[in-house]
Image (spheres, rainbow, N blue to C red):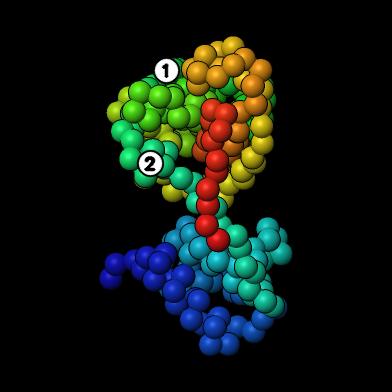
Amino acid sequence: MNERSHLFISTDIRTRITTGEWSPGALMPREIELADEYGCARATINRALQTLADEGLIERKRRAGTRILELPKQHARLEIPIIRHEVEAMGQRYHPNLLLNEERHAPDVIAANLKLRTEQRVLHLQTLHMADDQPFAFEDRWLNIDAVPEVRVAPLDKVSANEWLIRHIPYASGNVSFGAIQADEHVAGLLEAKPGSALFSVERTTWRGEQMITTVQIAYPPGYQLRSAL
């Protein structure tokens, strides 16, 4: 018999929660017990439970176990956009211009952000996203190669790291911040902006389990507007 998928298990557990088999506030069985019940690996149970945690049905705490929430949390979910889609939605032709693709040791601040060991190497990528012949965004990305070794053979000169990661590497969690940065001469030149001008910036870090995947800063030229939906 084939092992049941995490999607089957998350759906079944969701049904057991909504039908009242486990009361709000109650502790769920341990992962090892659920793995035995469903006849699967603990990693499959872990992934199924993370799906339900992301939906706000359960709360997972190390050492404290997994508990059914009294009231399901409502999440404002922000999807990571594929920049190519943004450009094409404006009726323009998209092209990623890969400026830097370098494997190296990370600076201290990046190593700390990605929780790297001192001997670990990362991939430093810089991409200028083009809309027709105009710069649309500048992306400065650091990627944990141990988490994503297949990136070494990814065609990043044809498919941006932004799109390749979204399509090929699942992530469980992340954090994102929005703000303004002052354009230095290098970035200003790439984005055809004046040095010192204010640029809209998105900084994002994503991880899977306890393994950090990537941290990135994307800067947009003056006049860019972020659009989203509720």
Where is residue 85 shown, x and y percent of the image? Answer: 37, 43
Provide the secondary structure element on which disc 2 rests. loop
Q: Who's the residue at 64% across and 63% down the image?
A: 60
Q: Who's the residue at 68% across and 58% down the image?
A: 62
Mark drawn on residue 78: none
Provide the secondary structure element on which disc 1 rests. strand
Few, some or many C-alpha atoms within 10 Å of disc 2 (few <14, some 14-19, many ≥20)? few
Q: Would you say residue 200 is visible in this rendering?
A: yes
- Separation of disc 2 and disc 1 at Cα? 24 Å
Identify the residue position indicated by label 1 in the image.
Answer: 99
Mark 2 / mark 1, whichever is N-terminal:
2
* 79 to 126, vertically: above or below: below
- 2 or 1: mark nearer the eye: 2
Q: Nearer the viewer, residue 139 or 199?
A: 199
Q: Nearer the viewer, residue 155 or 129?
A: 129
Callout 2 amino acid = Met
Q: Who's the residue at 62% across and 45% down the image?
A: 175
Going by the image, does 46 lie left or right of 3? right
Q: Nearer the viewer, residue 149 or 71?
A: 71
Callout 1 amino acid = Leu
Image quarter in which the N terminus is found: bottom left
Where is residue 31 shown, x and y percent of the image? Answer: 55, 66
Identify the residue position indicated by label 2 in the image.
Answer: 90
Few, some or many C-alpha atoms within 10 Å of disc 1 (few <14, some 14-19, many ≥20)? some
